[in-house]
C-alpha cells in the first residue's frame, strides 16, 4: 500500500495532490483538494432587510427549533427573507402542519453579499428529512432548491437555512416557499441489494475507478486464510440481520447467480487508506435502484482493532460497513453515535458490535442541527418487511478493556464532506 503527498497549499488557490494506490494492483485514484485561504478585511455583517413582504422577515433569535420564526403556509405560499451574518448562523422557520402527499417547494428568489446558502427540512421531532447543502458550491450548479414530498404527517414542519459546509459566507436572502396540498401519494418501494464477492469494477466520477478480483479472506490478513466461504456467509447473514425489519432483499454472487437488472450492487475487495467503503451517492429517497458501492475489504487491517478479531467478528465489522454504504444508496446520511450503522467516525473497534439503524444526532458535516432517524426513513423509503423474521442473535466477542483509538473512516463520502468543510472546492480523479 502506498500513500504519496505532493505539492502543498499556498495563499490564494493551491492544489494538493494525494495519490493513493488501492489494493494490490496498479490502479490509482488522485484526489485533488483545492484549498482556499481567505484574507483581507471583512465587511460588517449584513442587517436583515425585507424587500418584498416585511411580515415575512425572520425574527432573531431563531437558531433553534424552540425559537423558530412562525411562517405557516396557511395560504399556500410565502416569500421569506433573512440574513446569515456569522459563522454557524442558522435561521429556523416553522412552516406549520404538513400531511402525507403534500409537496413543499423551496427556491432562492434573491441573494446579496457572498452568501452561498444551504437548506434543511425537519419534521416535528427535529429529525432531518431532506436537504440541499452542496448545490451552492462554486463547483456545483449554484441553484439551491428542494422539492420535498411529505411521507409522514408533521406538525410543525421546519425549514432551516445557513451557509454551506465549504466555509463561512454571509449575506441576505429571499426564499420562495410554497406547498401543494395532497399533490402526491408516495409509496415505499422494495430494494434488492446484490453483494458481489466475485470481483468487479466500480467506476465512480468522484472517487475513481476500482477494479477488484474475487473476495479472498486471506487478502485481509494471513490469519484469515481458508475462511473465505465462512466469511462470505457471515457477512451476508449480518447484513440481512441489519435490514431484516425492512423490505430489502439481500442476494449475493456466490449463492444467487447473476445480479438482477433492478438491484443495487455492492462490490467487495481492494484497499483504501482513508476509508472502509464508498457509496456512489447519498441517493435521497432512493431515486436510483441500480446504484453502486464498494467495500474495501483489505482496509480492515487487524491492528486497527486492538487485537486480531476472529473471522466471525471481522465479518460483523465488514457487514456493518456494508449496511452503512447500502444506507447511503437508499438515501441515509451520517450521524454521530457509535451504536448506529450510519455513524461516521467512531474508533474502528466499534464496528465489532451489533450496530443498528436508529435515531441519532445528525453529522455536523451535513447540517449543524437536529437528528437523523435512519429507521423511520427506511420505513417510508422501502417499507417494512412483509414477513418479518425473528432477530438473529449476534455472537460478538467483547473487545479488550483498553482499546487503541485507531480509526479509519467508515466511508469516503464523509471524507469528502470533511474536505469541503476544511475549505476544499471539490474532489477530482485522474
Image (tube, rainbow, N blue to C red):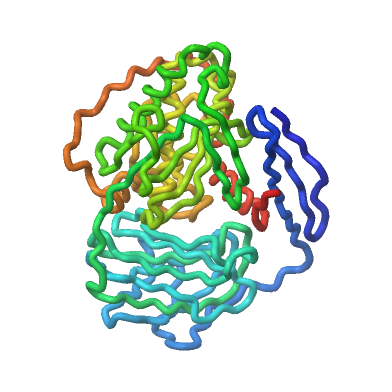
In-front residue for pair 218/201: 201
> Is residue 281 visible to us here?
yes
Q: Residue furthest front?
A: 258
User: Which quarter shows the N terminus?
Assistant: top right
Relative to 134, 149 lies left or right: left
Residue 12 locus on image (x, y percent): 80, 60
Residue 279 locus on image (x, y percent): 50, 45
> Is residue 345 visible to us here?
no
In-front residue for pair 208/311: 208
Residue 173 locus on image (x, y percent): 52, 77
Q: Residue furthest bottom?
A: 52
Relative to 409, 381 lies left or right: left
Relative to 186, 305 lies left or right: right
Which residue is found at the position 76% from the left and 68% from the top?
41
Q: Residue furthest left?
A: 387
Which residue is found at the position 56% from the left and 21% from the top?
220
Residue 7, located in which quarter of the rendered image? top right
**Above or below, comparing residue 89 to residue 241 in the picture:** below
Which residue is found at the position 41% from the left and 24% from the top?
232
Residue 88 locus on image (x, y percent): 55, 59
Which residue is found at the position 35% from the left and 46% from the top?
374
In-front residue for pair 135/290: 290
In-front residue for pair 204/281: 204
Residue 124, located in which quarter of the rendered image? bottom left
Amino acid at each position: 500500500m502506498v500513500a504519496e503527498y505532493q505539492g502543498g497549499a499556498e495563499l490564494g488557490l493551491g492544489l494538493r495532490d494525494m495519490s493513493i494506490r488501492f489494493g494490490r494492483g496498479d490502479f490509482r485514484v488522485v484526489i485533488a483538494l483545492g484549498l482556499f485561504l481567505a484574507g483581507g478585511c471583512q465587511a460588517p455583517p449584513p442587517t436583515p432587510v425585507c424587500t418584498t413582504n416585511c411580515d415575512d422577515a425572520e425574527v432573531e433569535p431563531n437558531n433553534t427549533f424552540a425559537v423558530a420564526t412562525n411562517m405557516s403556509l396557511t395560504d399556500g405560499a410565502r416569500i421569506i427573507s433573512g440574513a446569515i451574518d456569522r459563522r454557524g448562523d442558522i435561521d429556523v422557520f416553522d412552516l406549520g402542519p404538513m400531511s402525507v402527499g403534500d409537496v413543499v417547494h423551496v427556491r432562492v428568489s434573491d441573494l446579496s453579499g457572498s452568501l452561498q446558502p444551504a437548506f434543511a427540512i425537519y419534521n416535528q421531532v427535529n429529525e432531518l428529512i431532506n436537504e440541499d447543502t452542496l448545490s451552492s458550491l462554486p463547483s456545483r450548479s449554484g441553484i439551491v432548491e428542494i422539492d420535498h414530498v411529505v411521507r409522514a404527517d408533521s406538525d410543525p414542519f421546519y425549514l432551516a437555512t445557513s451557509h454551506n459546509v465549504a466555509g463561512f459566507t454571509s449575506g441576505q436572502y429571499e426564499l420562495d416557499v410554497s406547498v401543494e396540498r395532497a399533490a402526491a401519494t408516495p409509496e415505499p418501494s422494495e430494494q434488492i441489494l446484490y453483494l458481489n464477492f466475485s470481483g468487479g469494477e466500480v467506476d465512480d466520477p468522484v472517487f475513481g475507478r476500482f477494479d477488484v478480483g474475487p473476495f479472498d479472506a486471506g487478502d485481509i490478513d494471513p490469519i484469515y486464510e481458508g475462511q473465505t466461504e465462512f466469511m462470505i456467509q457471515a457477512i451476508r447473514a449480518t447484513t440481512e440481520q441489519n435490514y431484516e425489519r425492512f423490505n430489502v432483499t439481500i442476494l449475493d454472487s456466490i449463492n444467487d447467480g447473476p445480479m438482477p437488472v433492478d438491484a443495487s450492487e455492492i462490490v467487495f475487495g481492494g484497499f483504501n487508506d482513508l476509508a472502509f467503503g464508498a457509496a456512489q451517492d447519498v441517493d435521497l429517497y432512493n431515486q436510483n435502484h441500480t446504484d453502486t458501492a464498494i467495500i474495501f475489504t483489505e482496509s480492515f487491517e487487524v491492528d486497527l482493532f486492538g487485537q486480531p478479531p476472529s473471522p466471525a467478528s471481522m465479518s460483523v465489522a465488514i457487514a456493518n460497513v456494508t449496511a452503512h454504504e447500502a444506507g447511503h444508496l437508499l438515501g441515509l446520511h451520517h450521524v454521530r453515535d457509535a451504536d448506529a450503522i450510519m455513524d461516521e467516525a467512531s474508533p474502528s473497534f466499534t464496528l465489532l458490535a451489533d450496530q443498528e439503524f436508529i435515531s441519532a444526532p445528525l453529522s455536523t458535516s451535513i447540517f449543524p442541527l437536529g437528528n437523523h432517524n435512519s429507521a423511520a426513513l427506511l420505513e417510508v423509503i422501502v417499507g417494512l418487511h412483509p414477513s418479518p423474521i425473528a432477530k438473529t442473535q449476534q455472537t460478538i466477542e467483547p473487545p479488550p478493556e483498553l482499546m487503541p483509538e485507531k480509526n479509519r473512516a467508515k466511508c469516503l463520502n464523509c471524507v469528502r464532506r470533511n474536505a469541503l468543510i476544511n475549505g476544499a472546492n471539490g474532489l477530482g480523479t485522474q
